[in-house]
Amino acid sequence: MFRQLLLCSFLCLFVASCKREERKFSQPPAQFKSYDVTMSDVHPGSTGVQQPVKSASDEHAYDTNEGKRLFTQYNCSGCHANGGGGMGPPLMDAQWIYGSNTENIYSTIVEGRPNGMPSFRQKIPDAQLQQIVAYVKSMSGQLRKDVEPGRTDDMNARRSEQRTERKTPQQTTAPPQ
Amino acid sequence: MTSKTNTISRICQCLLALSVSSCGGIQNAVNPAGPQADSLSRLWWLMFTVCSVVFVLVLIAVLLALRNRTSEPPANTPPLLELPPEQQRRRRNAIISAVTVTAVILFVFLIVSYSAGRSLTADLAHKNGLTIDVTGHQWWWEVRYNDADASNIFTTANEIHIPVGVPVLFNLHGADVIHSFWVPNLGGKRDLIPGKNNSAWYQADKPGVFRGQCAEYCGLQHAQMALWIVAEPQDQFNAWRQSQTQTSMTPTTDSQKRGQQVFLSAPCVMCHAINGTPAGSNVGPNLTHIASRNTIAAATLSNTREHLAQWIKDSQSVKPGNKMPQNNLGEADLQALLDYLQSLK
């Protein structure tokens, strides 16, 4: 009896591994949208802090890997290097000047930020933006480990996203403008 | 009964037609158009002929043995433990001669295939009548014509023009994963490996259009990663090369001008380059002379207005998983963009 149970549980394990992440290539073309971004706890009127936006890409290994590819191909690495920062701030640490939520990173890319971050409005389709946002989050270990990229094809200046230390995002002040 | 015979004869006809159809064609190793493919196809025909003869001889030997088999010994005879000396001698002779013939054939094959292999790879440094850098991307080919004069260097994609009778040296690189460059009518295949420089040379002895295909599984759209080699006389090639080194056409009509603005303000500009405009990214194929090419999307679609529109709007329906995003352009913007792209001769 015990043996049969053991066998059954093994079989269940095998079946569980059959579920494969689905890659949706033929989604309807994404609309450009803009998130309402709250930067501080002080807000006019009675509207409370909005719920953070949930992005499907944050739970999708293929999307974060595509984000990693786009991060290089769209030359984000030109200023942020491979997350370590250069001309632009590092993205692999816990310090977030303009917020670490999906909608914050999204609007940082779409609208640009003072002191150098250009605006990519209309230049990057929404689906790709979500992939890049997911990847940016993975660089400081904010996503699930099995979703984060596990290896890199370039020389390793740091650990892969999967092996990055988990960090708790902290808000820092924006630099003087 | 007749219907069964009919079916069998029809199947035979189909097989015959298939075997004959593979003897011509634009992507065919036994229809050589250059010295390399020639030596490869001669090697193939030699091996095919010899192996066929051996196969037929073995079949005949088996049939003879079946026909001349000795009759069953009567019951209650003690089993024969040893063959009579005469039979033993014949058997030994047969085995020795068959082994000798096999060894000789294999040795001849070894020599012939070694010398054919040498002829493909030897003397690479002197095969540089023209040097072309080919980079394999998922899932298209980047083609860069090198020249000592920097103003003659240009980049195109998926369509390689070469002059007839000139050895062309290909420097092969991989941008993401391993691909393999193979144009069967011109020669053998060679891998494009990221981080490694590989070389191969081809020569076309007659003008023509030959299809090449990625020959190393490289992901979802490996099957749709093809290229064309256009072999043309030297003067035609020179004219083509001259036109490719020019910067892109300046838009003339209002629609083309609007199309250029659409291109520069839409996601197109993030990946594609059009020389002579601010678009300069090398992530996707260079579109400076897109209208001069016969196909788009790595020889997946012919280069027509409808196909271009389909590809721009929803390339994922043509090649699922390819790196070109779907684009959400308005109808007027799309038509203007098509006008502009089609003017880029």
Image (tube, coloured by chain):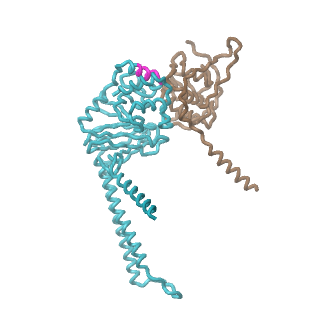
Foreground of the two, A38 or B257: B257
Instruction: Reply yes or no: does residue B165 show up in magenta.
Output: no
Q: Which residues are magenta?
A: B258-266
Instruction: Reply yes or no: does residue B261 show up in magenta.
Output: yes
- The answer to whether A153 appears left or right of A60 in the picture is left
The percent position of residue B136, horizontal first and vertical second, equals 42, 38
Instruction: From the rendered image, report the letter of the chain displayed in brown.
Output: A
Q: Is residue A3 placed above or below B237 in the rendered structure?
A: below
Foreground of the two, B212 or B110: B212
In the displayed orientation, state which residue is furthest to the front.
Answer: B2
Whether residue B245 appears in this view of the structure is yes
The percent position of residue B241, horizontal first and vertical second, equals 29, 32
The percent position of residue B167, horizontal first and vertical second, equals 28, 42
What residue do we see at 62% from left, 33% from top? A59
What residue do we see at 51% from left, 84% from top? B79
Instruction: From the rendered image, report the letter of the chain displayed in cyan.
Output: B
What residue do we see at 35% from left, 26% from top? B344
The percent position of residue A52, horizontal first and vertical second, equals 66, 24
Foreground of the two, B343 or B44: B343
In the displayed orientation, state which residue is furthest to the right.
Answer: A1
Q: Is residue B269 placed above or below A162 in the rendered structure?
A: above
Quadrant where the image shows the C terminus of chain B = top left
Q: Is residue A73 placed above or below A98 in the rendered structure?
A: below
Q: To which quarter of the image does residue A160 belong?
A: top right
Could you tell me how many numbered marks the image carries? 0
- The answer to whether B242 appears left or right of B260 in the picture is left
